[in-house]
Image: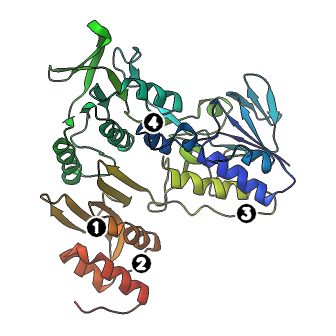
Amino acid sequence: MIYVVVGAGPAGVVAAEQLRKLDPLANISIIGSEPEPPYSRMAIPYFLTNKIHESGTYLRKTDKHYASKNINIVNQRVNSIDTDLNRVITDDGNYRYDKLLLATGASPSVPPVPGIDLPGVHNCWTLEDAREIVRLAKPGASVVLMGAGFIGCIILESLALRDVKLTVVEMENRMVPRMMNDISGNMIKRWCEEKGVVVNTSTRAESIEQIDGGKLRVSLSGGTSVDADLVISATGVKSNMQFAVDSGLHSDQGILVNEYLQTSNEDIYAAGDVCQGKDFSTGEYSVQAIQPTAVEHAKVAAGNMVRGHRSEHAGNVNMNVLDTIGLVSASFGSWMGVPGGEFAELVNEKQFKYLNLQFDGDVLVGASSLGLTQHVGVLRGLIQSKTHLGIWKERLLKDPMRIMEAYLSSAQAQAIPA
């Protein structure tokens, strides 16, 4: 069998290794468009803060890892797929496949801001981006970060540790709006401001222009402006699926797949940020642009690509865990709740602690937290197990901090007195 994996991120690497495990005699290739060995984007912040060298971002740490597993690494850009001949077309040639996995990930969205393509304006997505940020974000430099979502806040912490003068611009009314509600999102904002970061929410960057001395001027909605040595755009991502769409594969927000992570073409599968896969909580299909989902997709897809192996993908719990200058936030499952559901909430503004539990009947279906790291595993476990809490649901509505007791009670199948 000939397997081709397009995409050299975590999903692509894990899939290729799983294919080798299941099919020792197969021909396996990973095709990636970047010149570096396969690396993790999630490790780039550690490179920005000098905690690791570039090589520390590599997914596998030995030079001969892929050769030892007889996995071919091809550094080329894929342009199209010939689904009639089962060939992947690149800039320099073509590669035949029996089964193909698309793990092409995502790319930064480009906001419609005049001047977004000027020198000194960068994304923080690739190692090449990171090298430019390291060059420009010297201690004392003025930096404008456009976007305070999940990716933006990861970058924010790295910039703060580089001791720059940081201004954040976020169009929503709170930070990390896709994982935190108004209360917790604005608690994160206040935490950052107390750490010396200027945070502008409900604000847009209207334009970027060059001014004297090589600086950039970012004009904001409301009539103010900020001068900067570096502007970083972190306003969202979109799935890298255009060549797949042009090749006739069905798509929506990502490449559409069935319960086996198989696309509309029976010989082609998808995994990771490009894949519109099943959500565990809702049963619907959506793009979950997080690394744990990408790795799980890779294992399931690889298994289904090998003859004699067939397993359904049950869906992944949507989860995010974020450290913002020392304040850890997390969200799991249907953290915004479900129609008709009840919720419990604890707010401690002074100590930056927050806990929100969302119920469907007596089942915990979603949660979000701030400054409460000891509950992360418990929250995920209860959501994923769909445990019926019984009387503990009412106890949690009164005091959500008793979540550990509820978890232990369910695990031990015995009641704990109120």
Tell me how far mark 3 sits from mark 1, CA to CA: 36 Å
Measured as percent of width and height from the top left, residue 190 is found at 17, 46
Q: Amino acid at mark 1?
A: Leu
Disc 3: which residue: 310
**Colour scheme in use:** rainbow
Q: Along the polypeptide, which appears first: circle 2 or circle 3? A: 3
Q: Nearer the viewer, residue 180 or 279?
A: 180
Q: Residues within 10 Å of mark 2 (few under 14, many from 20)?
A: some
Helix, strand or loop at label 1? It is strand
Residue 357 shows which numbered tag? 1
Q: For marks 3 and 1, give the one nearer the viewer.
A: 1
Disc 4: which residue: 237
Which quadrant is home to the C terminus? bottom left
Measured as percent of width and height from the top left, residue 224 is found at 15, 21
User: Which residue shows up at 27% across the image and 6% down it?
Assistant: 212
Q: Residue furthest top?
A: 212
Q: Nearer the viewer, residue 362 or 335?
A: 335
Tell me how far mark 1 sits from mark 2, CA to CA: 14 Å
Q: Amino acid at mark 2?
A: Thr
Q: For marks 2 and 4, give the one nearer the viewer.
A: 4
User: Which residue shows up at 51% across the image and 59% down it?
Assistant: 316
Residues tagged 1 and 4 counted as in contact (Cβ below 8 A): no
Disc 2: which residue: 387
Q: Along the polypeptide, which appears first: circle 1 or circle 2? A: 1
Q: Along the polypeptide, which appears first: circle 3 or circle 1? A: 3
Q: Amino acid at mark 3?
A: Arg
Left or right for 256, reference 108:
right
Helix, strand or loop at label 2? It is loop
Measured as percent of width and height from the top left, residue 62 is found at 68, 47
